[in-house]
């Protein structure tokens, strides 16, 4: 289609460049150059119009030229590429917010267009937020998958059916355009799938007869995450979630007040006692001065021990699907770090957007203290004699 548009513009006497970009492109071998040439050669009138060399594609009349760039490392050079009439960004899932901010103003010729094609993976991606969640007013969004292909080959149909039967966790992502709900190397993929299959993700209302426990992951220079939970016997009801960044502790205290819950415990990470250089006070002291009571400091366990505690807790968790959607997504995506060189999973989590909500869940799992008796346990008496 880029070649067709270039042909139309060339026939109208327009001149310009068609940019084909990806987030990472170390050489032309990583680009869509060969795809472009293959597409042009498949249509006689396009092959007649374009000249395809080893490292270039351009129209024979000199009006239309293709250029290829990796957005991650070539952003500044894009500004110098004058007269961009079309930018096609392929595999756009991983394109950063910074890349979009620099690319979009670069494509500024009257009537120019930006195309992005990708298989959605995460609701948190910059591409999803910019182009689907809050798209430009003049955007056109089209969802396409295998059933829209009239030439869909039988070999791919066989693969599709195999994925549907043997790999249901990724089937919707690969074939139906859904988000990737369980990342490869996921810590909690099995437990979160069980939550969904047993209908433990839905509507979970606040029960005013039960106190609310909050668990915090306090970010320094990045996000702070708060999980809101109610405990009823073995049940852990995750009723709410909040996350923000770039604001002071007074902001989070006000959020707690505005929600109107009755709190009985606030679980904070062990480093909350560390004094800040500027004020000389710890964040624990600041929160206490702001009126936060019933604070518990989570024990300083290893990350692996905390992850195991969350796994055990998730078996008894119920989630409010609307208010804790971001937390649910994070628990599904939280995964081990991948060693590209060694081709193996490392023994530590990948630090990304899912880290903060999952750390807050970890503090909830290891820091909650039971405030009521478990009626399922036998009564124990300390009898020393009989009168």
Image (cartoon, rainbow, N blue to C red):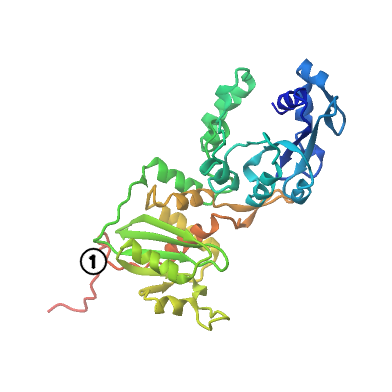
Residue 385 versus residue 217: which sits nearer the camera? 217
Considering only vertical position in the picture, is 17 above or below 357? above
Q: Seen in the image, is 8 located left or right of residue 93?
A: right
Kindly identify the residue that appears in the image at 62 percent across and 18 percent down.
Answer: 154
Considering only vertical position in the picture, is 216 above or below 140? below
Let me know if residue 294 appears in the view.
Answer: yes
Res 104 quadrant in image: top right
Q: Quadrant where the C terminus lies? A: bottom left
Kindly identify the residue that appears in the image at 44 percent across and 49 percent down.
Answer: 325
Let me know if residue 309 appears in the view.
Answer: no
Q: Seen in the image, is 125 located left or right of residue 321?
A: right
Kindly identify the residue that appears in the image at 45 percent across and 80 percent down.
Answer: 285
In the image, residue 225 lies at what x, y percent?
Answer: 47, 61
In the image, residue 70 lies at what x, y percent?
Answer: 75, 44
Q: Which residue is mark 1?
A: 379
Res 51 quadrant in image: top right
Considering only vertical position in the picture, is 76 above or below 121? below
Most distant residue in the left direction: 387
């Amino acid at each position: 289609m880029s070649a067709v548009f270039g042909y139309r513009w060339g026939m109208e006497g327009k001149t310009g460049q068609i940019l084909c970009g990806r987030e990472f492109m170390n050489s032309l071998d990583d680009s869509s150059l060969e795809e472009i040439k293959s597409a042009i050669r498949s249509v006689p009138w396009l092959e007649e119009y374009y000249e395809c060399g080893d490292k270039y594609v351009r129209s024979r009349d000199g009006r239309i030229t293709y250029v290829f760039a990796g957005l991650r490392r070539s952003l500044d050079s894009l500004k110098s590429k004058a007269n961009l009439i079309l930018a096609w960004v392929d595999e756009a899932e991983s394109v950063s917010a910074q890349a979009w901010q620099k690319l979009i103003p670069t494509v500024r010729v009257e009537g120019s267009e930006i195309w992005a094609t990708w298989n959605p993976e995460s609701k948190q991606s910059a591409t999803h937020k910019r182009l689907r969640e809050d798209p430009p007013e003049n955007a056109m969004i089209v969802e396409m998958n295998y059933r829209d292909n009239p030439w869909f080959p039988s070999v791919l149909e066989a693969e599709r059916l195999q994925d549907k039967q043997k790999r249901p966790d990724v089937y919707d992502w690969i074939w139906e355009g859904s988000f990737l709900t369980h990342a490869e190397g996921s810590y909690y993929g099995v437990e979160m799938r069980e939550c969904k299959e047993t209908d433990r993700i839905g509507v979970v209302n606040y029960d005013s007869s039960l106190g609310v426990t909050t668990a915090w992951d306090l970010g320094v220079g990045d996000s702070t995450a708060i999980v809101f939970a109610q405990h009823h016997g073995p049940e852990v009801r995750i009723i709410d979630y909040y996350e923000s960044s770039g604001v002071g502790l007074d902001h989070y205290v006000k959020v707690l007040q505005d929600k109107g819950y009755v709190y009985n415990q606030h679980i904070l990470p062990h480093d909350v006692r560390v004094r800040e250089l500027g004020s000389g006070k710890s964040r624990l002291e600041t929160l206490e001065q702001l009126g936060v009571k019933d604070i518990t400091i989570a024990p300083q366990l290893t990350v692996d021990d905390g992850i195991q505690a969350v796994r055990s807790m998730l078996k008894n968790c119920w989630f409010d699907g609307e208010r804790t959607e971001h937390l649910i997504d994070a628990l599904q995506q939280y995964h081990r770090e991948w060693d590209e060189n060694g081709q193996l999973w490392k023994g530590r989590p990948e630090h990304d957007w899912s880290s903060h909500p999952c750390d807050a869940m970890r503090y909830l799992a290891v820091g909650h203290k039971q405030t009521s008796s478990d009626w399922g346990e036998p009564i124990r008496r300390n009898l020393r004699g009989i009168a």
